[in-house]
Image (cartoon, helix red, strand yellow):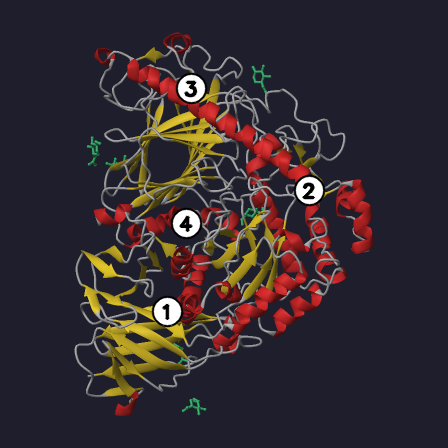
Amino acid sequence: MTADAVTGSSTAKRKIAFAFFLIVCLAISLTVGLVLHFNKEKENSPVSSLGERSDVIVDCHPESDGTEEKCKDRGCLWSPVSDKGAPWCKFPAGYGYRMVGDVMDTPMGMRVELERTSHPQYLTRSASFDNIYLDVDFHTDSRLRLRFYPKNDSRWEIPDSVLNITSPSKASETTRLYNVTIVDTPVFGVIITRVSNNQTIFNTSLPGFIYSDQYLQLTTRLASSNVYGFGEHNHRQLRHDLSWKTWSIFTRDVAPVDEWNLYGAHPTYMNVEDDGSAHMVFLKNSNAMEVFLQPSPHPAITFRTIGGVLDFYIFLGSSPGEAVQQYTAAIGRPVMPPYWTLGFHLCRWGYTNISDLRMVIDRNREIGIPYDAQWADLEYMFNKFVFSYNRETFPGLPDLVRDLHDHDQKFVVIVDPGLGNDPNISSLIKHNSPGYDVFDDGSREGVLVMNPNNSGPIVAEVWPGTTGYPDFTNPATEAWWEKWARYFHDNESIEFDSLWIDMNEPASFVPGSVDGCENNKWNYPPYTPNILGRGEDGRMYDKTLCMDAIQHLGSHYDVHSLYAHTQAIQTYNALKNIFPDKRPWTMTRSSYAGTGKYATKWMGDNQSRWEQMKWSIVGILEFGLFGFSLNGADICGFWYEAEYEMCVRWHQLGAFYPFARNHNALGDAPDFFKPQDPAAWDARFVRLAKEALITRYKLLPYLYTLMHNAHARGDTVMRPLLFEFPNDPVCLSVDEQFLLGPALLVSPVLNKGQTTVTAYFPEGRWYDYFQGETVAVNKDYLDLDTPLEKFNLHVRGGHVIPWQVPAITTNSSRKNKMGAIVALDKEGRAEGELFWDDGESIDTYETDHYLLIKFRMPKYGELHVVQTGSVSVFPPPPPPPPPLDQLDIYGLQTIPLSVSLDGHVVPVDNIRQSYAITSLLNLNMTLTSNHTITWT
Ligand SMILES: *[C@@H]1O[C@H](CO)[C@@H](O)[C@H](O)[C@H]1NC(C)=O
Ligand SMILES: *[C@@H]1O[C@H](CO)[C@@H](O)[C@H](O)[C@H]1NC(C)=O
Ligand SMILES: *[C@@H]1O[C@H](CO)[C@@H](O)[C@H](O)[C@H]1NC(C)=O
Ligand SMILES: *[C@@H]1O[C@H](CO)[C@@H](O)[C@H](O)[C@H]1NC(C)=O
Ligand SMILES: *[C@@H]1O[C@H](CO)[C@@H](O)[C@H](O)[C@H]1NC(C)=O
Ligand SMILES: *[C@@H]1O[C@H](CO)[C@@H](O)[C@H](O)[C@H]1NC(C)=O
């Protein structure tokens, strides 16, 4: 939960928190005020002095207090331009680096040495390196790396133990999809072109390349204005608005409402080229940074980071989807989640005691809503000390968890990194939880983040009061973390199924530490990116730890944004050891590039507001691009009270998020938010939520197959239309509709009172999911009548979608009969697949413990169901899927005269027409053997 929405156990604490909140607000408005003031001055300048922008402008004074004098002091040019928001202080053409000597060959590619041009230092407090190298490594035919580093200095870089991008051997010149050109006039630049379309995809032949200790800047031209990605932010739209926008990247605990840097750090973007091919660029750098975008006709991106090295990886996809596949091949494929995580989840911050929790479980079981997992937020803990439960307010919690298990339901608990160390509570908790010693034990074992002077663990403040922080960059922390997770499972007897890792930006309610932070170049760097809370003094540590705190792998200044990433790795490993036969699953709030290999992601502490529904789609789609498959936002919103209509609509939307959880906040006494779990509303609400969730449960075999394809080959699960239709200009900006896999189109209602959705249908044949009518056959906008009773789901012709008779838990639905939708394209064909395994063992794909059933139609009227993967070699074999009993064919003009299955005639009684769907019933096809269905 967000700490901005602070409540505490005592009124005093709330008051402090509120005062803090006011200060933050004040700081924000001061910053905003300054910026506005600056812009206003520009607007008041005589128009006659404004020039036209003729090329990319590299901003030489991103600080808000720019003047002509300061600009010239930096050796830059003051040149007012008429574009609103464009910088007026720009680098002169020759400012940057020049080559020394010739291009050198290296085992992986080539190297150039660069020397700084003789311009004034950009920042007086951060000296530039006069000599640097650029290594260009040809990793694969479609991936290359550009790494700039000082000639004789070793600097912080993300180590392989944290993010291991391996490259086999130098890609051959004859097969590489790219050309690299080095230019040196008027200044050094590197230009990368795609050979197939001669498109320039990366071009730094621009001034203002700066490489200093605490300020590194590089600008590249873009191939087009179709830019996606960069995170984590609450982007309002999927395709970036390039109009002089600055996005800062630095992990931060703040609710996704404004446009500040948020929980995760993803210095990654995608640029879709004019012919529909797409490349991605990842800046492997963990320091605080910002990116500055500029619009057509000279679209460009400026990277400004305040540490580390400039280490770019460039991926050349033939399509957006393939670019993501290449990206996750490098940083790690999304983790394969257990089957049950695809079910519906319920959570609330505000189950104040065990009877409250029990009541919610009971009433939602009673209404028979699909419901797989119950989560517990902060309250279950003893004074919010992690790995404990409160025996006074939650007596019998171990039995409640067993009862959940007896009902095929799971239990997930929140775990924060902040370890309570208040001596008074620490002595009390020993009575509540015998043997509890988490903080002191961590301190003794030396696995906590240390004070700048190494005098002891750094102490800040989170929910339990004063807190220490595990140092997850230390390999020794893993065994210690596992030990206490085991303590919770074995000694506290809470048989949890998963740990939900929150507040791992990491968050602190006091800036830096209980003792504040020193005034030095880490806490107050020469340049502070536009991060939330930097205030006027440019502090880096607002809402987190001091930047000079010490971690095993480096200073917090360098590793801050890797906190959750390293925690996710160690939590994944701990769960793997605690439950040796089970697939580990953890959900995280903060993340870095590659975290998706270990954890899944929810969008954090959103709000019960209509606009958040749209934003959730943008965020989830972006995290697909960042390599996460099981993403979702809190259904009905977390903070504030959900209203009826919105909450219905949000269930209709959230039922098609990859991860579907209704999660509510507590609210502030006496105005606690009313509950928003489905059973808390009326019968009509229950019916509508159930209809959406039952549809989800029916489609779980398809969703699970998508999860597998994400894990095995880097496909996205919830994907933007542009991934399937990159050549359709309309699709480049669609973000109020989305696809699940290639075949299901979701067009939700996102506004209050709205009952018509104007939906776009790209090229192809599209069917109404429920009745099978063809709604569109060619690019088309349609007005879909969508009263509150309805939601829009469409099937794309050419695809087979496996389904299963739904039940109220995934464990029972997995045992039900299966079916498949066969949606024919214009040629009367369709294909698809079904991945099946036991749903919970680890590495079933890697160890061949799965079935992959392919549906193919070599010609019209002949469907082959082909089993690949060999059941026979399984020791022991996985339970085979239930028989495929029904096929629903969409797109037949007339009922077939005769149908045969494996050469036997299917009785006419088993051929049914309902609306526009032709169903073949009672097929009883075992999926461990092959079948052929033909119809005429
Ligand atoms: C880099 O080279 C300069 C000049 O030779 C030297 O003064 C400096 O100490 C070197 N830095 C490192 C880290 O080796
Ligand atoms: C990185 O991956 C390579 C190839 O899989 C492996 O050999 C190496 O040990 C890994 N390095 C680390 C530090 O994990
Ligand atoms: C790439 O380089 C090769 C060899 O230098 C050259 O023949 C080719 O024209 C270049 N292609 C593009 C698109 O620049
Ligand atoms: C590629 O485009 C550049 C201009 O951007 C042009 O000079 C060059 O001749 C083109 N090369 C090929 C192989 O088409
Ligand atoms: C379905 O097939 C299985 C074996 O192939 C058989 O044992 C079972 O009786 C069949 N069920 C029905 C309803 O025909
Ligand atoms: C099904 O067909 C595939 C492809 O022809 C073949 O490899 C496989 O062995 C067959 N499986 C069975 C159980 O016959």
Q: Which residue is mark 1?
A: 833
Q: Secondary structure at mark 4?
A: helix
Query: Label 2 to label 1, Cα distance in Å?
Result: 55 Å
- Mark 4 or mark 3: which comes first in sequence? 3
Closer to us: mark 4 or mark 1? Answer: 4
Left or right? Give the position of 868 relative to 13: left
Q: Which residue is mark 2?
A: 10
The disc label shown at residue 22, or none: none
Q: Amino acid at mark 4?
A: Ser
Query: Label 4 to label 3, Cα distance in Å?
Result: 31 Å
- Residue placed at 55% from the left, 58% from the top? 347
Tag 3 near tag 2, CB within 8 Å: no
Closer to us: mark 3 or mark 1? Answer: 3
Q: Residues within 10 Å of mark 3 (few under 14, many from 20)?
A: some
Q: Amino acid at mark 1?
A: Glu
931, 139: nearer the viewer: 931
Q: Secondary structure at mark 3?
A: loop
Q: Which residue is mark 3?
A: 64
- Mark 3 or mark 2: which comes first in sequence? 2
Q: Quadrant of residue 163?
A: top right
Q: Relative to 379, say whether 873 is above or below.
A: below
Horizontal and vertical percent for residue 231? 44, 40
The disc label shown at residue 616, or none: 4
Horizontal and vertical percent for residue 173? 34, 40
Q: Quadrant of residue 719?
A: bottom left
Q: Amino acid at mark 3?
A: Ser
767, 423: nearer the viewer: 423
Query: Label 4 to label 1, Cα distance in Å?
Result: 28 Å
- Mark 4 or mark 2: which comes first in sequence? 2
Q: Residues within 10 Å of mark 4 (few under 14, many from 20)?
A: many
Q: Residues within 10 Å of mark 2 (few under 14, many from 20)?
A: few
